[in-house]
Amino acid sequence: MADQSTKENKKEKAVGSDQENGEHGISRRRLLGTAGATGLALGAAGGATGYAVGSSDDSGSSSGASSPSPALTSVGADMAMFHGKHQPGITEGLQASGHLVAFDLAAGAGRTQAAALLRRWSDTAQRLMAGEAAAHDDTDVARDAGPSSLTVTFGFGYGFFARTGLEKQRPVALDPLPEFSSDHLDKARSNGDLWVQIGANDALVAFHALRAIQQDAGSAARVRWQMNGFNRSPGVTGRPMTARNLMGQMDGTRNPKPSEADFDKRIFVPASGEPSWMANGSYAVVRRIRMLLDDWEQLSVKQQEDVVGRKKSNGAPLSGGSETTAMDLEKVDANGDLVVPINAHSRITRPDENGGAAILRRPFSFHDGIGADGTPDAGLLFVCWQADPLRGFVPVQRKLDRGDALSQFIRHESSGLFAVPGGAGEGEYVGQRLLEG
């Protein structure tokens, strides 16, 4: 568990008059006029503001920041782009509010119905991400808000291909994940034919998108499961810094970054990859990981740090330095004991300890209430991205299964693996190359 800019011509295209956006849509002119010049500048920076996501190191959700946090008045004006090489919601910074939802195709629904559904969903996502109203029966929930960095991402599960007669197009990388000893999976809250990830920096904007996507499903698909999550809101810290997960640990220090030379190779399917419809796409592993907080909070700070391998106060490795200092795995204390314990979570999950396996973590925290025994149902909606889960998530999780100190304080309660195709071009819908190829 564990840190894009928009083109000005596209930005201008999204800025329309009241008449262009309709009576039920947000007026871009009014929005940007209210935000002022500062809002315009930060809106142009888009998702790059506050970028940082987690890696195959550390202890939970991915977040943090490498750029100044936006002023609070600009949060609503920030806009991610729907069209592009990759789908939105993968490399953008963490959003404050999110929803994960899986659908199963209805009985009798096949390739034709699936194509029509993905066309509807893509149109709705494009509109809402631009701060406009949905095309039909908009609920007005987000009428007073801007785009708020909304992203909507679509993926296909293993069963989707049999339902649509596209078994020959099912990627080998989508084969079911192996079982792990830490799994306590609820099948009703796992997998699904279709998966949608929604994130925004405003809870009403995120809910508005969730409701629109559900309404668009109509009779073609039904909800299999749905989960709600949250992260730190933009602008709540005095300086850019890595966020904390619900265990209080700074989380996201070693996430792969797009600036790294091998980032695309690790995270995205190459343009020449197989199957061809997955070009520039990625694979999302989704896990609901419950944190046993009552047990965790009984530990002293020193004990918690030994479990993770990092200082709770600033995220620095126990071997010394600052948050970004390289971890010294061989350093010992006066008694000859390793400073970073052999079973520390951050040691076990390092890429150089797993044959170079790396994943891009971009999760949400969750809290779904308190049980009759007073135990919080809380933890991490873990979402990680990789070009191939058999070379990313699977080897890391197998290593964790063999002796991660954190494992006794968490429980994997649901799981899913989804093929997320590349981004849609202008005039296309997500998945069109699969469904019409």
Image: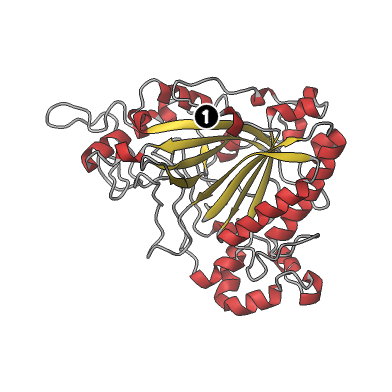
Q: Quadrant of the C terminus?
A: top right
What amino acid is found at the position of numbered circle 1 in the picture?
Phe
At which x and y percent is residue 370?
41, 45
At which x and y percent is residue 408?
35, 29
Q: Establish if 146 lies above or below 258.
A: below
* Within-10-Å neighbours for mark 1: few <14, some 14–19, many 20+: many
Outermost residue toward the left?
334
Q: Quadrant of the N terminus?
A: top left
The answer, for residue 374, to whether it is visible in the render is: yes
Report the residue at 65% width, 22% height from top: 175
Report the residue at 47% width, 36% height from top: 289
Q: In the image shown, does 47 or 122 lie closer to the viewer?
A: 122
Q: Is residue 75 left or right of residue 19?
A: left
Residue pointed to by mark 1: 393
Q: Is residue 262 left or right of residue 239?
A: right
Report the residue at 49% width, 58% height from top: 50
Res 344 quadrant in image: top left
